[in-house]
Amino acid sequence: MTYLSLKLIHILSAIVLFGLGSGTVFYKVMADKSGDHAAIATTSKHVVLADWWFTTPTVIIQPLTGVLLAEQLSASFGDGWLWWTLVLYLITGLCWLPVVILQIRMRDIAVESLAQGRTLPYLYHYYSKIWLWLGVPAFFGMIGITTLMVFHNSLWS
């Protein structure tokens, strides 16, 4: 595959990954703030689906295209910018994995409590706080990765 084709796939995948992450946070937080139990249950279901349909493929595409691009540039992981990109990607991934588990649990809690006519339990809100705080380092990790991708020649030349 040509360098430009790989780069396009890599960039589009990064846009989907970052955009979807920002969007799901916005909609989940807004649903939670509304206090509308049905909206919370529906949004929780959609957040989980979005992660499976869009985030998971991009999480796989990013390192694959990244390694292929690095090979075409003759870059090595000994290069500072590439090493830091990998470190930030791993930190972001370590935040994302528990987020996925929490999203599934919150979805199940919201759907079950709605079906039973109960209010959302404390556990849902507790998970939601952890979910949000895990998103903070992941968000800044993605900002750092994007910055390194754009400015690597300027920073390490």
Image: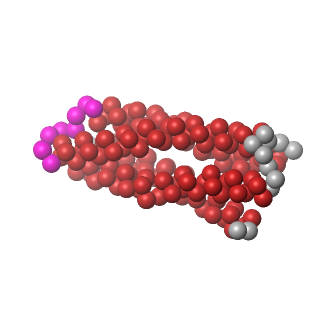
Report the quarter where the C terminus lies.
Answer: top right
The extreme right residue here reads 157
Question: Which is more toward the observer, 150 or 6?
Answer: 6
Left or right: residue 15 versus residue 154 is left
Q: In this orientation, does residue 36 appear?
A: no
Looking at the magenta stretch, what is its main secondary structure?
Answer: loop
Please state the extent of the stretch shown in magenta in the rendering: 115-123
Display coloring: secondary structure
Residue at (19% x, 45% y) in the render:
112
On screen, 93 above or below 58?
Answer: above
Q: Tell me residue 129's x, y (percent).
A: 38, 33
Residue at (28% x, 53% y) in the render:
42
Q: In this orientation, does residue 84 appear?
A: yes
Report if residue 117 lies within the magenta region.
Answer: yes
Q: Tell me residue 109's x, y (percent).
A: 24, 41
Residue at (70% x, 57% y) in the render:
68
User: Could you tell me how many numbered marks the image carries?
Assistant: 0
Q: In which quarter of the image is residue 12?
A: bottom right
Q: Tell me residue 148's x, y (percent).
A: 72, 45
Report the quarter where the N terminus lies.
Answer: bottom right
On screen, 68 above or below 108?
Answer: below
Left or right: residue 120 versus residue 85 is left
Left or right: residue 147 versus residue 153 is left
Report if residue 18 lies within the magenta region.
Answer: no
Question: Which is more toward the observer, 25 or 9?
Answer: 9
Q: Tell me residue 97's x, y (percent).
A: 46, 41
Residue at (27% x, 32% y) in the render:
123
